[in-house]
Amino acid sequence: HPSTANAVNAVNAVNAAAPREGTLEGVHASSRELPPRVPPTTTPPTTAIPLLTLLGRVHLALCQYRLSVAETALQACRQLFGSSAFVLASQALICYEDNQHGAACQIWQQLRRQHPTYLPTLECYSSALWHGKKTLECAELAQSLLRLYPQHATTYLVIANAMSLRKDRVAAIKCCERALMLNSGCVYALLLKGHEESAGEDLSAALKSYRAAIRLQPRSYMAWYGIGSVYFRDRKSVV
């Protein structure tokens, strides 16, 4: 019968098109379930939180000038990260803030050998070289950063210290102003600028620079020291 044959053919077509049991297509037509999904092999984000917390403790202690706390936290970091750029830079900064400029320079030299493109804290390295009257080393550092980072504020801070060692205060101040153009929130540029202005007997300009630094970073002891030294030299100044 034609109608019966058509019905049989339709059923056969549906059966042929239906997904087979046990295949991926037949998963919804059968009682079987897919095997459990294998979790990704990447490290879950939660495992990075203790590491970031440890790094944050070092950074916070350095910002608060709590050198012993920073040193303790850095010891734990050293066990995990070895001679990473952050560990070396933080250790150099601890020595620098503790007035151990020679030791700080040695660590920064190691940092430059192992991580030649690492930029943070190098402005302090140039200041340590300034304290040690290392004119040639500071000039070499400035040239290196000028090749790597010609449009970064840190580069011009290093150049400012190099110019200061050459007794070229006008060029040093211009470099600080250039650094502020590149980064208006750069406290270190204001500190260096205030120092050069004070050394050049422009005390009113130095006060403006130090006060601007304090507005950005109230805990900056160098800015407070700068203001105190200006008032000590010019007792007629008005707060």
Image (cartoon, rainbow, N blue to C red):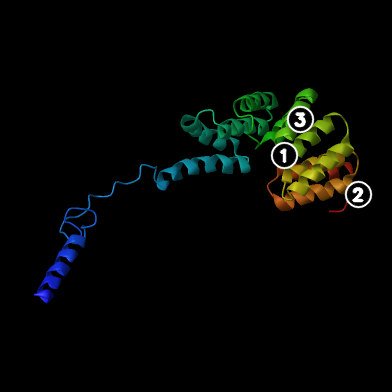
Helix, strand or loop at mark 3: helix
* Rendered image: mark on residue 166: none
Residue at point 63% right, 24% down? 113
The span from disc 1 to disc 3 (Cα, nearest Å) is 12 Å
* Residue hosting label 2: 236
- Return the x and y of residue 152 as percentages of the image width and height: 72, 42
Residue 7's quadrant in the figure?
bottom left
Helix, strand or loop at mark 2: loop
Between disc 2 and disc 3, whose residue precedes?
3
Q: Is residue 14 above or below residue 165?
A: below
Q: Are marks 1 and 3 in contact (CB under 8 Å)?
A: no
Q: How many marks?
A: 3
Q: Amino acid at mark 2?
A: Lys
Q: Amino acid at mark 3?
A: Gln
Q: Is residue 14 above or below residue 197?
A: below
- Is residue 190 rendered to the left or right of residue 15? right
* Residue hosting label 1: 154
Out of 75 and 157, give the one closest to the viewer. 157
